[in-house]
Amino acid sequence: MKKRQLLTSGKSVSEIGLGCMSFAGFYGSTTEQEAHETLTAALDLGIDFLDTANVYGNGLSENIIGSFLKRDDSKFAIATKGSIWRDPDTGERGFNNKPAYLREELEKSLQRLGLDHVALYYIHRRDTDVEIEAVMETLLSFKAEGKIGGIGFSEISPASLRRAAAIGPVDAVQSEYSLWTRYPELGMIQTCKELGVAFVPFSPVGRGIFATRTPDLADFADNDFRKNTPRFSEPNFSYNVKQVEEFKTLAADHGTTSIALAIAWCLAKGDHLLPIPGTRTAEHLAECAAGSALNMTSELMSDIERVLPVGWAHGDRYTPAQWIGPERYC
């Protein structure tokens, strides 16, 4: 597995990471054993970059990673996140970027992971009551204390990134980016490149739409993140599946899978991109990792753009309720 720079300090990690939201059952039930098998497979594949968050299963994802690290002290570079709060009884949620809350949540994350330091700490969503400059000061204090190696933000705008970077080094920005979610091309990917910030695409396989096996809406559990989202609701879903079939044919014609091709496309969009596909199985992770070895050519990139041109997807990526938090721009 090839490496790419993650932190401004020069620290490099595998160019494909592992998103660990699936360990908390967001896309179907799983077990700790299955998650541990996936983590073992990650090491075998040369993947050493994990991405999680305090709210993934109310700490479940972090606990699973922590239990794995207790029996296997292999060195993963781990990124986690804070700032989203949820009421487990009512489901109500909000965002808190105040220093005391972020410190409390970081300490809880470290405890669950069984670590005294994480490679990267993200603000999961911005709290508009706290200026981003003040948030940077808080994160810089965590870094000075040795609790975090780098600073990240999730789903912010290019303008917010510039404001944050004026206070201190921002190491990474994470946003959804894939062949059907290309909003970051309207300024974020370019701004990250200009400022020397890693851009970390989550859901590069389109929450499963580019998987070898087409998702079945009837299989979605009530707590599946995709349930009732516009792109996975009819009639949008059928339109999307039909268009993706041509992409799958293109992948097969080049002797690869749609998953590997989607990842390879993402990697080819810039050498500062580090996609973090999420999966709960070792088999699917191996398909994702194959994208690193795929030989991407300008001709193949052109064919992909022809089959899936910008704006091809039917439906929005989020419901109105889910849109609360990500910063829009352009």
Image (cartoon, grey):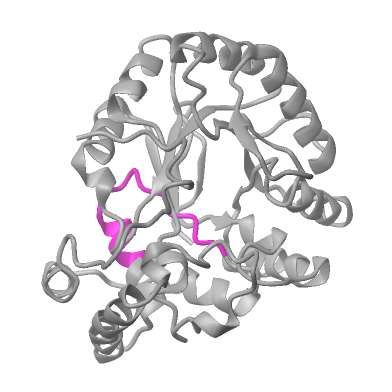
- Residue placed most toward the observer, 18 or 314: 314
Q: Is residue 215 above or below residue 195?
A: below
List the single residue furthest toward the front. Answer: 90
Residue 296 picture location, percent across and down = 24, 69
Q: Is residue 71 left or right of residue 202?
A: right
Q: Residue at x 56, y 61 (%)?
A: 225
Residue 23 picture location, percent across and down = 70, 61
Q: Residue at x 27, y 85 (%)?
A: 242
Residue 101 picture location, percent across and down = 70, 20
Tally of numbered tags? 0
Q: Residue at x 65, y 26 (%)?
A: 148
Q: Is residue 185 left or right of residue 147?
A: left
In the picture, the quarter occupied by the C terminus is top left
Q: Is residue 276 left or right of residue 282?
A: left
**Quarter location, residue 109:** top right
Can residue 235 be seen here? The reply is yes
Q: Residue at x 46, y 11 (%)?
A: 131
Q: Main secondary structure of the magenta part?
A: loop
List the single residue furthest toward the right. Answer: 71
Part of the protein shown in magenta: 263-278
**Quarter location, residue 194:** top left
- Residue placed most toward the observer, 39 or 310: 310
* Magenta highlight on residue 42: no
Residue 12 picture location, percent across and down = 49, 42
**Quarter location, residue 55:** top right
Q: Is residue 217 above or below residue 230?
A: below
Q: Is residue 102 above or below residue 191?
A: above
Can residue 20 be seen here? The reply is no
Q: Is residue 36 above or below residue 282?
A: above
